[in-house]
């Protein structure tokens, strides 16, 4: 069960979609990392669909192979390099196939990808996907191509994403891009650029289109959704220069939630990821106001020690975080939280570690993503701090955090037993084809026996009679 709490990075996922008969070329598109990357891949597929590409699940028949990459941890980059080695062997027998790297790893390494043993032909950063048609003309002419220019305005708001794979029930809608927070351990500000928000009307339009097409749940995505700010004037950092009218009509995240929940009242609304520094009580009030906004927040804390939070350049203290949690539970009593935690950051002492464990007990998270700190090149921590916690100490502390989260998860799952939950059916259980799987409002996974007439996408009432550490066991009411 430990890997559930250790590894947030999703394995490579390839997609296939309905083919356009007029398209003659094939695209193999594989994504790694966070939900933002998977959402970006849908934008890429949409752009390339207009350029004559249908997607395929078989890379050996593809004319174009693209990996949408993650740089959040060293393991993610190693996985991509291993995959590229496979494609390099393919190019020996099919030299005309084009191999490209997209996303955060492309932005971080830039021309190094083109120089390292000629692993790839194409390197494209997360703000340059519109340039793919021009870049592919370069590679068709036998030249390497690269665009890793970061933008202050690009949000891809006018591009209707192609929904790749998935279950036809849940979908992602990106509302912000980039990040201004500059946490010392994080590469995101350097690989995704400055923070900017998407026009709220384009967000609502996309959600309404999803509802018309039968989707039942949407997750609003951003590196930091709580800092969403639309005023028609560009990046958030320039808001001080906005006109009085722009400031008066600005839309913040709580207002956006209100607008989306009202526009698609029959769809469930989730959001990720949140930042304690920017989260406000207004968001929780919107959750209480709208029954279709799910009672669940992923609220990364990273450490329970104020000393570590300061070294990480997190803009919140332990007390402020716990006050926010209490405020949320007062407004939305049935709310659930999950966390991100970094163990063994530069200079972490045993006392710092114990404070992390005590914070976890105070919050009682439903689940979490926990990691031992590893240096990421280019970050302030890598440049200015010593990674001085021994590997064996990191390993032991991480295991203690994992073990505690396991206890907390079991306790939280047990609290759902003996109650009726509204579950959105997302598909068949992997272990039993005679059972459905889905999630309740608090994001807990439930499995239950199929009943005649039920189908994927239905919202059903399920009585939960038992649980495991990570799953609710129930039956349809």
Image (cartoon, rainbow, N blue to C red):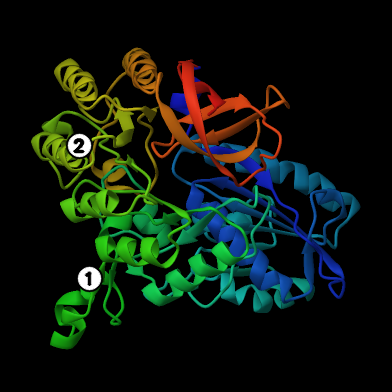
Residue 377's disc is: none
The residue pinned by badge 1 equals: 237
Residue occupying the point 71% across, 51% down: 15
Whether 273 is drawn above or below 50: the answer is above
Query: Does residue 182 show up?
Result: no
**Residue at image x 52%, y 78%?**
158
Q: Which residue is more in the foreground, 196 or 92? A: 196
Mark 2 residue crowding within 10 angstroms, few (<14) / some (14–19) / many (20+): some
- Horizontally, residue 95 falls left or right of residue 146, namely right
Residue in the picture at 22% in, 70% down? 237
Image vertical order of residue 327 relative to residue 213, above or below: above
Cβ atoms at labels 2 and 1 below 8 Å apart: no
| Label total for image | 2
Residue furthest to the right in view is 93
Mark 1 residue element:
helix
Q: Residue 329 carries which label?
A: 2
Element marked by disc 2: helix
Q: Is residue 7 left or right of residue 99?
A: left
Q: Which of the two discs, 2 and 1, labels the residue nearer the N terminus?
A: 1
Residue 409 in view of the camera: yes
Give the CA separation, mark 2 to mark 1: 31 Å
Which quarter of the figure has residue 253? bottom left
Nearest-to-viewer mark from 2 and 1: 2
Where residue 295 appears, x then y in whole percent?
A: 34, 42
Q: Where is residue 110 in the image (x, y as percent from the top left)?
A: 52, 60
């Amino acid at each position: 069960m430990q890997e559930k709490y250790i590894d947030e990075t999703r394995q490579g996922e390839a997609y296939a979609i309905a083919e356009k008969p007029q398209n003659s070329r094939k695209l193999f598109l594989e994504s790694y990392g966070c939900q933002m990357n998977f959402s970006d891949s849908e934008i890429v597929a949409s752009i390339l669909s207009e350029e004559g590409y249908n997607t395929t699940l078989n890379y050996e028949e593809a004319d174009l192979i693209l990996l949408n990459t993650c740089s959040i941890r060293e393991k993610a980059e190693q996985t991509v390099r291993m995959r590229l080695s496979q494609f390099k062997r393919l190019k020996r027998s099919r030299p005309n196939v084009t191999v490209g790297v997209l996303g955060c790893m492309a932005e971080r390494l830039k021309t190094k990808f083109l120089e390292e043993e000629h692993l790839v032909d194409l390197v494209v950063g997360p703000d340059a996907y519109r340039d793919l048609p021009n870049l592919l003309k370069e590679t068709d002419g036998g030249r390497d191509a690269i665009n890793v220019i970061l933008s202050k305005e690009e949000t891809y708001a006018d591009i209707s994403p192609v929904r790749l794979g998935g279950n036809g029930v849940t979908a992602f809608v990106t509302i912000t891009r980039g990040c201004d927070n500059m946490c010392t351990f994080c590469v995101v500000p350097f690989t995704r650029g400055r923070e900017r928000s998407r026009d709220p009307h384009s967000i609502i339009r996309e959600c309404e289109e999803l509802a018309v097409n039968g989707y039942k749940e949407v997750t609003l995505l951003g590196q930091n959704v709580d800092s969403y700010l639309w005023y028609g004037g560009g990046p958030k950092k320039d808001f001080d220069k906005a006109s009085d009218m722009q400031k008066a009509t600005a839309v913040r995240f709580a207002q956006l939630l209100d607008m989306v929940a009202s526009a698609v009242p029959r769809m469930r609304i989730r959001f990720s990821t949140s930042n304690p520094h920017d989260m406000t009580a207004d968001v929780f009030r919107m959750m209480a106001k709208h029954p279709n906004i799910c009672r669940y927040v992923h609220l990364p804390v990273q450490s329970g020690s104020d000393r570590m939070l300061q070294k990480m350049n997190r803009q919140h203290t332990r007390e402020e975080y716990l006050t926010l949690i209490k405020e949320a539970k007062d407004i939305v009593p049935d709310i659930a939280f999950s966390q991100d935690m970094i163990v063994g950051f530069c200079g972490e002492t045993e006392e710092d570690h114990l404070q992390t464990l005590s914070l976890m007990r105070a919050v009682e998270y439903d689940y979490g993503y926990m990691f031992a700190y590893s240096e990421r090149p280019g970050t302030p921590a890598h440049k200015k701090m010593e990674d001085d916690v021994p590997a064996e100490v990191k390993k032991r502390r991480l295991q203690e955090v994992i073990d505690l989260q396991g206890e907390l998860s079991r306790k939280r799952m047990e609290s759902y037993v003996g109650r009726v939950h509204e579950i959105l059916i997302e598909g068949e259980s992997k272990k039993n084809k005679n059972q459905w799987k889905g999630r309740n409002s608090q994001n807990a996974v439930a499995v239950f026996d199929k009943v005649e007439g039920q189908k994927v996408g239905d919202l059903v009432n399920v009585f939960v009679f038992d649980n495991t550490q990570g799953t609710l066991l129930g039956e349809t009411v």
